[in-house]
Amino acid sequence: MQTILVAIKDAHRRRTVVQAVHEAQPGASIREVSTLEDIPSLVQAVRPDVLITALDSERHGTLRLLDDMHVLCPQVSCVVVCRMEDFELVRNAATRAGTVDFVLLPLQTADIARVLAGIEERTQALREASAGMPAIDVSSPSPAQCEGETLLSAWASGRRDEGTREALLRCIPHGRVLMLCARPESGVDPARLEEWLRAYLRTANDLLLAREQTRDLLWALVYPAGERDAHWLRARLEAAAAHMRYSEGAAMSVGVSELLSIPEDALDAAADQARLALSYRFFAEPDRSSITFAEDLLPMTGADVPYLYASEEALYGALCARSMSRVEQETDALFAHLNAWPRPRPARVMRYVNRLIQQLLLRAGDDGVLSPQAVQRGTAQAPALFGTCERLCTLKGCVLTVLHSALRA
């Protein structure tokens, strides 16, 4: 049975929400409050599973409340009741506050029921994924694990002689193997991420870690014990990411290869798969964890950039109109297509965007829309900027920078 706290100042809207919750969850324990003040303190006393609030006359108070709840009471799921015209405002502001659910007005019992059922399912899944997880163990690793780490560190750093390979393979237990690469996000100490991976993914003597210093990647070979497979690892990674988000305010990026048997020549193939999976962090928001399995990429491995002639022409029309607002609008539309499933490989997206911007600038120069100096400056600036992009959102920002600079020249 869920405990639900309804914190809405407007009495009529509060009664409407309470009635809808009663109909959607007849057995729920419902508490009401007419103010947003001291809600975190009240939550600590009531310990609800769900907090329902509304974006009404105290919209800034509601957004501050979401931030406070994320920091002080991350275990409580938040639901915001809002109008359609306020949806984007709430969604954008709540992005930094982790998972926030929304219900649109006019209120429907079915919508409340769907959201509460989703929260209950999500909470139960996280609880099951977390069950039986070892606490962070600061004790020394076993001698076998130390030997394996030393060998894998040598392998990852490029010492791939036959002796190292044979010694490493002797340390690998029989069964299925996953090659996993993780890159810490900004603000996350690599040693801390190593600690998380040890705590959440270790099964007895099964985790080996090493770091490739040149690219600041953590490499790991994870050996599922018995019949533990990708589903088992996925659940632990998602639980680890949730724990990091709520307790540390941190994110991690992970790429995992397909399940492999252990032929002697499989390590390089597993590494390549893991690198490809990790590269798809390109589509994730910078402050969100990215967990990608190579097996998830199978439907997308052959995907190419879609045919975007109409979007390209619309962007060129905005450039010819010398309207930065239209350029921003058409760029948003173009990148919405690039972010749609199935997503092509990030390298293909980078090549496509670079080629498109070069063509647009040269075409605008030939048509007299841009001066030769603006074209020369833009075509030289674009590759340098794009080469630093690790995320799709960053790439879009660089495109706008180049086009804005060209229009101002």
Image (cartoon, rainbow, N blue to C red):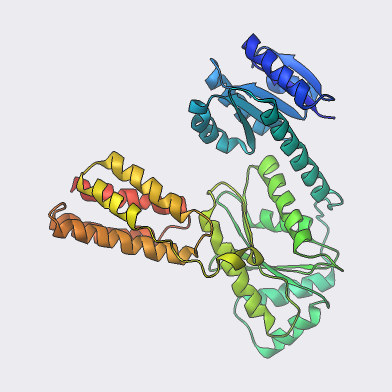
In which image quadrant can residue 350 be found? bottom left
| Observer able to see residue 147 | yes
Name of the residue lying farthest toward the bottom: 162
Between 188 and 235, the residue placed more toward the observer is 235
Q: Is residue 197 left or right of residue 64?
A: right
User: x%, y% of residue 301?
Assistant: 55, 69
Residue placed at 77% from the left, 37% from the top? 120
Say above or below: 325 vs 380: above
Image quadrant where residue 42 sits: top right
Query: In the image, residue 364 lies at what x, y percent?
Result: 19, 56
Could you tell me residue 264's position as x and y percent? 72, 85
46 to 71, vertically: above or below: above
Query: Image point 72% across, 21% down: which residue?
Result: 20
In the displayed structure, 210 sits above or below 112; it is below
- Percent of width and height locating residue 330: 34, 46
Residue 129 falls left or right of residue 371: right
Foreground pick, 45 / 306? 306
Count up the numbered dots. Answer: 0
Does residue 216 appear in this view? no
Tell me the residue at 20%/60% (across/down).
363
In the visual, does 219 lie left or right of 384? right
Q: Nearer the viewer, residue 354 or 164?
A: 354
Quadrant occupied by the N terminus: top right
Q: Farthest residue to the top: give it.
A: 11
> Residue sitting at 86 percent across and 64 percent down?
204
